[in-house]
Amino acid sequence: MTELHTHTAVNLAVWGDPIDHSRSPDLHAAAYAALGLHWCYGRRQVDAAGFADALGGLDASWRGLSLTMPLKEAAFAAAVTRDRHATLTGAVNTLHLGEDGPRGYNTDVGGLARALRRQGIDGVGTARVIGAGATAASALVTLVDQGATRIEVVARTPRKAEPLVALGAQLDARVTVAALGTGAPAPVDVTIGTLPGGTRLGDATTETLATAGGALLDVAYSPWPSSLAAQWQAQGKHASSGLAMLVEQALLQVRIFVGGDPAAELPREGVVLAAMRAAVGLEA
């Protein structure tokens, strides 16, 4: 692990557009306080067109960036190295900045996996992904890493899911695509919802998905419950909000910013994780 700089000015931030809703500053502030690091983690509204200039304007005090919509593809292009999950998904949500250039990571995949395990799900046979954006690619990789061999992607625009079919083939998993709101889906063990927060789906659609959906992990967390989660709950099924995934992926980002390695545990990591969960109102 690299030395922890407790007194040197260190800047980090989350960038995206929009960005005011982000809970990342709460999570990271809690983590660095628990670690005794006086690091500054802020937020900045940056769109895709302005990303390159914003990145180029950072000075040597900047240690890292968290990236959200719509910057994950631009961050991927800017990275001089990329981890396996970033390479597979074409998305970078974490840049570790240094003299050798920005190193790119996708911690959404690991965050999803850790959130599933926290639900007691460690191994998946069949699964469904709702949505076809960048987060859907991370969900697909997560599910394959958890053992899934058959995954259905349900999308409002099925053609947008074609890259996910190719990604599944690359990972030796069978991925099929269905239009949202059509047909009777086959039962699956797990559903991961990747639609933006506030997305409204018809009652008939959500009821059908919930009936055949197994446990739900919805990456949305505001407002909560999402329209998906409300239907799962109405049927007495477990539904977990995206806050669980947000915390876990942020923990991996902290590992990267502190030690340069998402696999290297932090000092007193249990205490750090508990502080991060408390910062967003989750039980330790």
Image: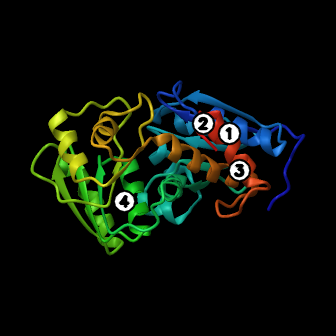
Q: Residues within 10 Å of mark 1 (few under 14, many from 20)?
A: many
- Mark 3 and mark 1: Cα distance apart in space: 10 Å
The residue positioned 31% from the left and 31% from the top of the image is 199
Between 264 and 160, the residue placed more toward the observer is: 264
Residue beneath label 2, please? 24
Residue beneath label 3, please? 257
- Marks 1 and 2 close (CB-CB < 8 Å): yes
Q: Residues within 10 Å of mark 4 (few under 14, many from 20)?
A: many
Q: Quadrant of residue 138?
A: bottom left
- Mark 2 and mark 4: Cα distance apart in space: 23 Å
- Mark 3 and mark 2: Cα distance apart in space: 14 Å
Residue beneath label 1, please? 28
Amino acid beneath label 4: Leu
- Marks 2 and 4 close (CB-CB < 8 Å): no
In percent of width and height, residue 210 lies at: 25, 46
User: In the visual, does 271 lie left or right of 26?
Assistant: right
The residue positioned 16% from the left and 55% from the top of the image is 185
User: In the visual, does 142 lie left or right of 229?
Assistant: right
The residue positioned 54% from the left and 41% from the top of the image is 67
In percent of width and height, residue 272 lies at: 73, 47
* Secondary structure of residue under mark 1: helix
Amino acid beneath label 1: His
- Disc 3 vs disc 1: which is toward the camera? 1
The quarter of the image holding the C terminus is: top right
User: In the visual, does 180 lie left or right of 194?
Assistant: left
* Secondary structure of residue under mark 2: helix
Residue beneath label 4, please? 140
- Mark 1 and mark 2: Cα distance apart in space: 6 Å
